[in-house]
Amino acid sequence: MTDKHSEMVLEIVELDNGELAVRSSELDAEPMIKIEFSAALKDQLSEQYLDVARVMLTAGIQLAVENGADLKPEAPEPEIIHTLH
């Protein structure tokens, strides 16, 4: 049985600089993988560049996991609050 709370959901996003990236959808974290197409290739592929990017990024994540990469983000250190009375 899979614990849904322990699953990480990944999303493919286009960054402000035009790069396409994979990142966790739950965290505002640094992208795990980024790729960039040249303007000429983007023009040749038209709208299909998004499909090509999806396949490339998915393959990269799968290969990383198969090679033992732990892609789950580390939990942040708990904040210690000192109460003075």
Image (cartoon, rainbow, N blue to C red):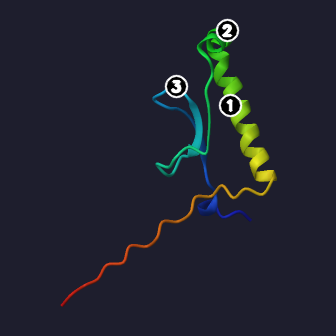
Please tell me whether residue 73 is drawn above or below residue 28 in the rendered image: below
Say what amino acid the circle numbered 3 marks: Gly
Give the residue displayed 69% in from the left and 58% down from the top.
70
Judged by depth in the image, the label closer to the viewer, 2 or 1, is: 2
Q: Which residue is mark 2?
A: 44
Identify the element where label 1 is drawn: helix
Earlier-in-chain disc, 2 versus 3 = 3
Q: Pinpoint residue 3: horizontal percent, then vertical percent.
A: 66, 64
- Pick out the residue farthest to the left: 85
Residue at the image point whose x is 56% and y is 63% from the top:
74
Judged by depth in the image, the label closer to the viewer, 3 or 1, is 3
Q: Residue furthest right?
A: 66
Left or right of 60 in this view: 27:
left
Q: CA distance from mark 2 to mark 1?
A: 17 Å
Q: Is residue 6 above or below residue 45?
A: below
Q: Residues within 10 Å of mark 2 (few under 14, many from 20)?
A: few
Q: Earlier in the sequence, mark 2 or mark 1?
A: 2
Provide residue 39's location: percent of width, then percent of height: 59, 13
Does residue 47 sit above or below 67 in this rendering? above
Could you say which disc has been placed on residue 54 in the image? 1
Circle 2/circle 3 CB separation < 8 Å: no
Image quadrant containing the C terminus: bottom left
SS at badge 2: helix
Q: CA distance from mark 2 to mark 3?
A: 16 Å
Q: Amino acid at mark 1?
A: Arg
Q: Please name the residue that numbered disc 3 is placed on.
A: 18
Q: Can you give x and y, in whole percent of width and height, for residue 61 in the image?
A: 72, 44
Q: Is residue 21 left or right of residue 83?
A: right
